[in-house]
């Protein structure tokens, strides 16, 4: 009997722990066909689990487990690249000692420093690490409640962990649409580095504000990095970006903090270049681009540019069947009374001559007969 299944896939050896295999068994007794819903949990796995037999059946590997003689067929393609993750094709050898050391060190960080967030970069989804990753996640979430009053957050990339178990992170990139589960973009004000380098270039305040708006409209959060100099000071250019973004949030933060996505994230011609490492590939936004967030009874329609003609049109708020009737519209940061006219092609807004700020402009929309 063995506690691990060792195979040669893609010309390289790879080890699958028995517990991981059994917990992810695709047979009809363990996984509902066609739905992917697990019928058995890891807590249902017998004590003393081991592999008594493994044989190649052409398109799959047949594995027999002890002590209950459960038999599973694992397709080769499933073992190599489950759900398309490239980590499934990572055959780097990882010893049990290394994996246990990783678990011990990560747990030590939790016990000593009680972090609110555990941010993991690439590779935690590598097959040999996944069993210890799940053990760490259980330990960390329980410990976060022990040391604080809220559950901590684990960040992951790609398919490194089951998507309901942690928060998906995209490095220097965004999503193209609303994701029902929370997610995060991590990026840096620097265009070239995560630290400090000479002759660096930086994102503008407008870029950061508009990126933040797009992310939040799609149920995401923005984790923004700054790189200090060797003496610990923040470069002047970076300080100015932070101050300008902060000034915008001081006026328009109601449309960002504590909000939820609307039924659509936005409208307009500009689509983000979705995926990691594409955040600077998105075209410039226009006055026809809107992003939406909600909080309480309010819908926030955020215009990504100022309309030069004195009128803005929000097409998503037209008088279509089943649409809500608009009661009032206010422009954050402005004392001007906004005249609104709801027609079939959208909500027409008469704008003041002067924009109340820069970067993006927030309209708070209230509807008739909404619960107060």
Image: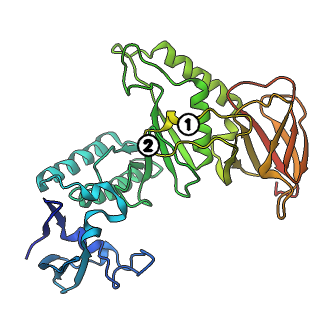
Residue 136 visible in the displayed image: no
Image marks 2 and 1: residues in contact by CB distance under 8 Å: no
In the rendered view, tell whether residue 333 sits above or below residue 63: above
Q: Few, some or many C-alpha atoms within 10 Å of disc 1 (few <14, some 14-19, many ≥20)?
A: some
Q: What residue is shown at x 56% (from left), y 30% (from top)? A: 208
Q: Which mark is residue 282?
A: 1
Residue 261: percent from left, percent from top: 64, 51
Residue 122 visible in the displayed image: yes
Residue 91: percent from left, percent from top: 18, 55
Count of picture labels: 2
In the rendered view, tell whether residue 75 sits above or below residue 178: below
Give the quadrant of residue 19: bottom left
Q: Which mark is residue 276?
A: 2
Q: Which mark is residue 33?
A: none
The answer to whether residue 77 is left or right of residue 84 is left
Secondary structure found at label 1: loop
Snapshot colouring? rainbow
Secondary structure found at label 2: loop
Q: Few, some or many C-alpha atoms within 10 Å of disc 2 (few <14, some 14-19, many ≥20)?
A: some
Which of discs 2 and 1 lies nearer the camera? The answer is 1
The answer to whether residue 11 is left or right of residue 41 is left
**In the rendered view of the protein, which quadrant contains the C terminus?**
bottom right
Q: CA distance from mark 2 to mark 1?
A: 12 Å
**In the rendered view of the protein, which quadrant contains the N terminus?**
bottom left
In the rendered view, tell whether residue 331 sits above or below residue 260: above
In depth, the one of 44 and 182 nearer the eye is 182
């Amino acid at each position: 009997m063995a506690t691990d299944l060792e195979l040669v896939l893609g010309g390289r050896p790879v080890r699958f722990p028995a517990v991981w295999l059994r917990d992810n068994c695709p047979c009809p007794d363990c996984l509902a066909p066609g739905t992917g819903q697990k019928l058995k949990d890891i807590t249902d796995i017998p004590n003393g689990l081991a592999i008594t037999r493994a044989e190649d059946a052409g398109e799959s590997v047949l594995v027999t487990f002890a002590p209950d003689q459960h038999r599973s067929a694992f397709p080769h393609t499933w073992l190599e690249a489950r759900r398309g993750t490239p980590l499934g094709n990572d055959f780097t050898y990882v010893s049990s000692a290394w994996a246990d050391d990783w678990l011990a060190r990560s747990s030590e960080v939790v016990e000593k420093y009680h972090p609110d967030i555990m941010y993991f970069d690439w590779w935690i989804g590598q097959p040999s690490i996944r069993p210890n990753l799940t053990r760490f996640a259980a330990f960390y979430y329980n410990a976060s409640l022990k040391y604080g009053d809220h559950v901590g957050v684990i960040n992951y990339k790609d398919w490194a962990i089951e998507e309901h178990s942690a928060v998906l992170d995209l490095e220097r990139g965004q999503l193209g649409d609303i994701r029902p589960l929370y997610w995060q973009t991590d990026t840096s004000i620097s265009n070239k580095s995560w630290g400090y380098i000479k002759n660096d270039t930086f994102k503008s305040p407008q870029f950061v504000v508009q990126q933040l708006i797009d992310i939040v409209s799609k149920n995401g959060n923005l984790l923004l990095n700054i790189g200090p100099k060797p003496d610990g000071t923040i470069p002047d250019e970076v300080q100015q970006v932070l101050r300008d973004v902060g000034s915008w949030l001081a006026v328009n933060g109601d449309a960002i903090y504590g909000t939820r996505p609307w039924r659509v994230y936005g409208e307009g011609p500009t689509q983000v270049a979705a995926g990691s490492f594409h955040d600077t590939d998105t075209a410039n936004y226009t006055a026809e681009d809107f992003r939406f967030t909600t909080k309480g009874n309010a819908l926030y329609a955020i215009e990504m540019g100022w309309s030069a003609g004195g009128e803005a049109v929000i097409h998503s708020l037209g008088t279509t069947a089943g649409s809500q009737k608009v009661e009032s519209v206010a422009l954050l940061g402005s004392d001007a009374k906004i005249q609104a006219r709801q027609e079939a092609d959208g909500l027409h807004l008469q704008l003041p001559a002067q924009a109340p700020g820069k970067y993006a402009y927030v309209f708070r929309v209230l509807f008739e007969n909404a619960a107060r």
